[in-house]
Image (spheres, rainbow, N blue to C red):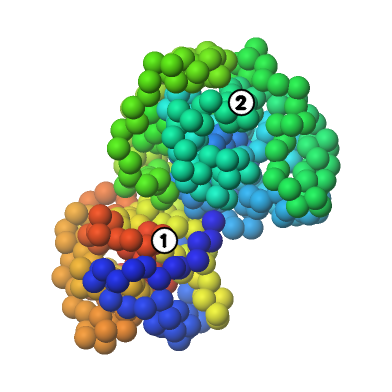
């Protein structure tokens, strides 16, 4: 998901303009002509179809999953692009994710692992209604719901029908892939809102429950952190070591629901409540505590990550060996870079208890003197020149000794000031990483 950088209202938080950052990035040159990149065996990660049910933390999860596969192996998430892929292009796809019906699993070649996340139906529906009320791009019903209370919206039969048993309907869709693709093309040609539910006979609880048991993985929003760790362990993904929170709705006061409205919510979610209970039973049967450090350690020892030579550069367009990063973007010279969230990590298999020179190219709209970097828990002393601070970034380097583990963790933190931030793109509160290298230094 590429989000345009919008200039926020002046708050004193952001000290460098977007244009300054873009100009600095476009002045960049690669670190050297023939870098040796960190080897990553992403082939261990299987073909995956993430059936994203709306309002189940899927945007955050989709950002995480995109960072686990090479960009060339990730399918576009818009119907307009998906329907135009050739058979040869489809053969390269190993990750497909989005608000797609069940039949899209047949879009990928070979054996495909299907996964989804589910959410307690009442809270999911309330979240849908709030989004429907505030966001004109969310659904055509926004025009009728703008500014209305939840109670008012629940009196509208069109809204009830749009929200009824959504999770069951998505998991029991019966149209074939060919039928669905032709249906999508017709909607695209008409320029109208894509509603593939109108091509279905209605939710089928028994079928949805059977498909739950066929899925390779089911997660619950109510146990999101442990569920993502279980997912990473199962599919050889890099486990998150900082909280995943790439997309959050505006903070609101707790919603008070009247008994009458609660009755309506239960009635329109009767099948979803039963299906959710089935999913929760399956999840709890599979649930187990996961230590992300142990998962990374196993991946390193299995050769999923490897360093060849005394110096290695991080290929930012490859799957990211860390947490808290947005998807890769490119400057005008096609040099890759990534925005971070307010907290991010890199986990790299450097030689234990050895001296290394760390060199990074960092940019940000925030004052970078606030950035803190730690190596295996030891905070580093960064000497930023006035030019780096004034221009919004540049090269930062330091020398330190790695810890005793099978991998070295770099932790980047910059204070989150979201309570004072009035912009619409939270990436501006983080920083940009446009290069990172690690070079062994003789003692």
Q: Is residue 266 above or below residue 384?
A: above
Whole-percent x and y of residue 377? Answer: 19, 54
Q: Give the quadrant of residue 412.
A: bottom left
x 33%, y 61%: residue: 422
x 42%, y 49%: residue: 247
Can the viewer see residue 7?
Answer: yes
Mark 2 lies on residue: 157
Whole-percent x and y of residue 48? Answer: 61, 39
Q: Give the quadrant of residue 120.
A: top left
Q: Is residue 61 above or below residue 389?
A: above
Instruction: State the mark number for residue 425.
Output: 1
Q: Is residue 360 above or below residue 424?
A: below
x 44%, y 35%: residue: 149
x 20%, y 68%: residue: 370
**Foreground: 190 or 338?**
190
**How many labels were placed on the picture?**
2
| 411 left or right of 313 in image | left
| 262 left or right of 109 in image | left
Can the viewer see residue 350?
Answer: no
Quadrant in the picture for the C terminus: bottom left
């Amino acid at each position: 998901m590429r989000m345009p950088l919008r200039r926020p209202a002046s708050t004193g938080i952001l000290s460098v303009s977007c244009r300054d950052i873009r100009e600095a990035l476009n002045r960049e040159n690669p670190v050297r002509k023939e870098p040796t990149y960190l080897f990553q065996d992403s082939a261990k990660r299987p073909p995956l179809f993430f059936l994203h049910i709306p309002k189940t933390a899927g945007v955050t999860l989709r950002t995480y999953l995109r960072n686990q596969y090479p960009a060339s192996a990730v399918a576009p998430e818009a119907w307009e692009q998906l329907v135009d892929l050739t058979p040869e292009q489809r053969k390269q796809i190993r990750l497909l994710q989005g608000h797609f019906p069940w039949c899209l699993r047949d879009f990928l070649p070979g054996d495909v692992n299907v996964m989804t996340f589910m959410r307690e139906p009442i809270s999911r529906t309330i979240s849908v209604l709030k989004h429907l009320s505030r966001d004109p791009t969310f659904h055509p019903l926004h025009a009728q719901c703008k500014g209305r209370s939840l109670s008012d919206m629940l009196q509208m039969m069109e809204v009830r029908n749009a929200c009824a048993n959504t999770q069951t309907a998505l998991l029991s869709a019966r149209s074939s892939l060919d039928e669905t693709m032709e249906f999508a093309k017709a909607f695209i040609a008409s320029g109208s809102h894509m509603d593939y539910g109108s091509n279905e006979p209605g939710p089928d609880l028994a079928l949805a429950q059977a498909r739950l048991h066929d899925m390779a993985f089911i997660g619950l929003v109510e146990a999101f952190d442990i569920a993502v760790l279980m997912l990473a362990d199962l599919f050889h993904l890099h486990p998150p070591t900082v909280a995943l929170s790439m997309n959050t709705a505006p903070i609101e006061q707790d919603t008070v629901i009247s008994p009458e409205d609660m009755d309506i919510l239960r009635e329109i979610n009767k099948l979803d409540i039963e299906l959710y209970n089935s999913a929760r039973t399956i999840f709890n049967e599979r649930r187990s505590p996961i230590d992300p450090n142990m998962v990374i350690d196993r991946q390193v020892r299995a050769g999923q990550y490897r360093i060849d030579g005394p110096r290695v550069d991080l290929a930012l367009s490859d799957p990211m060996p860390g947490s808290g990063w947005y998807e890769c973007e490119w400057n005008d010279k096609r040099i890759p870079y990534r925005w971070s969230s307010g907290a991010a990590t890199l986990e790299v298999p450097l030689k234990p208890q050895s001296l290394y020179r760390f060199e990074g190219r960092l940019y940000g709209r925030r004052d970078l003197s606030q950035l803190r970097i730690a190596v295996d828990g030891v905070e580093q002393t960064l000497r930023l020149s006035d030019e780096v601070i004034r221009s919004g970034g540049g090269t930062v380097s330091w020398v330190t000794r790695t810890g005793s583990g099978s991998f070295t963790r770099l932790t980047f933190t910059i204070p989150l000031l979201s309570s004072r931030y009035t912009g619409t793109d939270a990436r501006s509160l983080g920083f940009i990483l446009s290069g990172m290298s690690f070079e062994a230094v003789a003692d």
